[in-house]
Image (cartoon, rainbow, N blue to C red):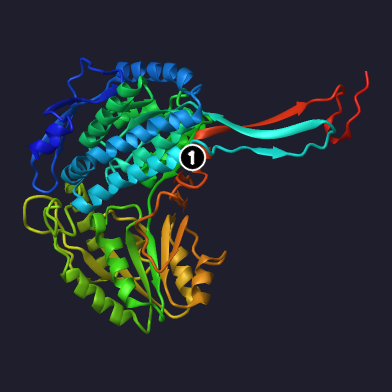
Amino acid sequence: MNRILDELGIKENNLGACIGGSKWIDNTSSDYIESFNPTNGEFLGRVKLCDKQGYEDIIDASNEAFLEWKMVPAPIRGQLILEMANELRNKKDLLGSLVSLEMGKIKAEGDGEVQEMIDIADFAVGLSRQLYGLTMHSERPQHRMYEQWHPIGNVGIISAFNFPVAVWAWNAFIAAICGDISIWKPSSKTPLCAVAVQKICNDVLNKNGYKGIFNLIIGKGSIIGEQFINDKRVPLISATGSTRMGIRVAEAVGSRLGKTILELGGNNAIIVDETANMDIAIPGIVFGSVGTAGQRCTSTRRIIAHSSIIDELTNSLINAYKQVKIGNPLESDTLMGPLIDQSAINDFSQALIKVKEEGGQILYGGNIIDRAGYFVEPTIVKAQNDYQIVQEETFAPILYIMEYETLDEAINIHNSVPQGLSSSIFTNSIINAETFLAHKGSDCGIANVNIGTSGAEIGGAFGGEKETGGGRESGSDAWKAYMRRQTNTINWSTELPLAQGIKFDL
């Protein structure tokens, strides 16, 4: 553990505010947050919180950096992100291990998260030469119309504990090639991961002679967080977290006519029909429900199974769950680590109390494991979709199993929750697959066939609908959210014809 922390520059006491490539900001505040390993409760380090003056210093530096950075040609911006990718490749094992230490996901998932950072960096490098506008035909003779995209300015990034480094990269790397400046407020549950990433950023910025492009603020939500989302100098806020948090961000940013990208709760379901290949359905469901101890926004929460195969599916899942090794996430054969903290344990317990009160039946698991750390048994519950607790997202490894007779019924069950992030169907029927993907099918931002709900690739735009927020991050044309659109009309004639044939003779 000490080697990992030392090589990433993490000390017992760390500062929580940084102007990237320039300086860490100290202050007179005595407020710290402490980080503990959720596997065993071991102290990892503490971070001094940013105060209001530190925040103002970072905003001032960000504004100054934007004036220079927006004028750098986009392909050259991409070269900086290429350098970031190379440094992350060098630090992949260390940073992946820190993610496991501080957040609790298994080492393979920690490394996988860093790989996501590398992948989005590679994507951003190519994208830096593809920020395409459009040309349009004008109705007026000897006129030309086109549309172009300009940098938007400061981009605020609010990330969650479950992906403590990757979500920052999804936003920051795309924002950077667009000519924007990033200001990152990470989760207070994983501050050391943010400090480690910032140190990597600083090394790359210093090497390339840039300052203030990637900046960090770790502070209280009630003070710095509120100041952040209400600040007109931050025109775009990209926030990942709970629906409750997203509503507050949307209200604050919307009231000042700012822009938001919101990636909020998921209550993701998989339909398993009577033709499904169980050899791929079972591992897809188990990874989706057990991976990251059920603490992904794309975790599988609900299984909607055809009546003819539900018993077979349930028995196979119970057998698979029995084989899931729970323990230290840094051990290579561990498949499920701990929950993040005691609050998550409480949510797990309360959800199971509620589901039993509503008539649900625990088929497997349901217990808190008596050992150091925040470990629970992955749990399978027979339930009904209209249970109140099933309509909610519980950030824990609880899987609800429900039965259906017709595909229309299954789709109705699937869509009858407030959230709309990820979805899947396992089927060998082309009719069922295409129906699920059609207008009458899944209402989620992500819809898959014969793969699970977790594990989205960075090339596709990531996000959902309804209470999931509606924004998009990462791939495809998600870059447009980080820029401002401008339509241009050029008259290259010697006359002034007006649009719509209007005559205005003087």
Q: Report the side of 41 relative to 216 (left or right).
A: left
- Quick check: 95 above or below 112? above
The residue shown at (21%, 50%) is 344
Q: Quadrant of the C terminus?
A: top right
Above or below, 83 against 390 in this view is above
Looking at this view, name the residue that lies furthest to the left: 371
Q: Residue furthest right?
A: 505
Q: Nearer the viewer, residue 482 or 147?
A: 147
Residue under the point 91% across and 28% down: 503
State which quadrant residue 282 falls in.
bottom left
Question: How many numbered marks appear?
Answer: 1
Measured from the top left, where is residue 405 in percent x and y? 44, 80
Q: Residue at x 21, y 18 (%)?
A: 29
Is 160 left or right of 273, judged from the image as shown? left
Q: Is residue 149 above or below residue 396?
A: above
The residue nearer to you, when weighing 365 against 165, is 165
Q: Is residue 193 visible?
A: yes
**Any part of residue 466 in sight:** no
Q: Relative to the observer, which residue lies in front, 138 or 31?
A: 138
Q: Choose top left, top right, bottom left or bottom right for residue 493.
A: top right
Residue 387 image point, x, y percent: 35, 65
Q: Amino acid at mark 1?
A: Leu
**In-front residue for pair 350/69:** 69
Residue farthest along the bottom direction in this orientation: 308
| Picture quadrant of residue 31 | top left
Which residue is located at x 32 percent, y 77 percent? 278
Q: Position of residue 216 (x, y in %)?
A: 31, 27
Q: Position of residue 49 (x, y in %)?
A: 23, 25
In this picture, residue 336 sits left or right of residue 456: left
Q: Which residue is label 1 attached to?
A: 127
Q: What kind of element bears circle 1?
A: helix
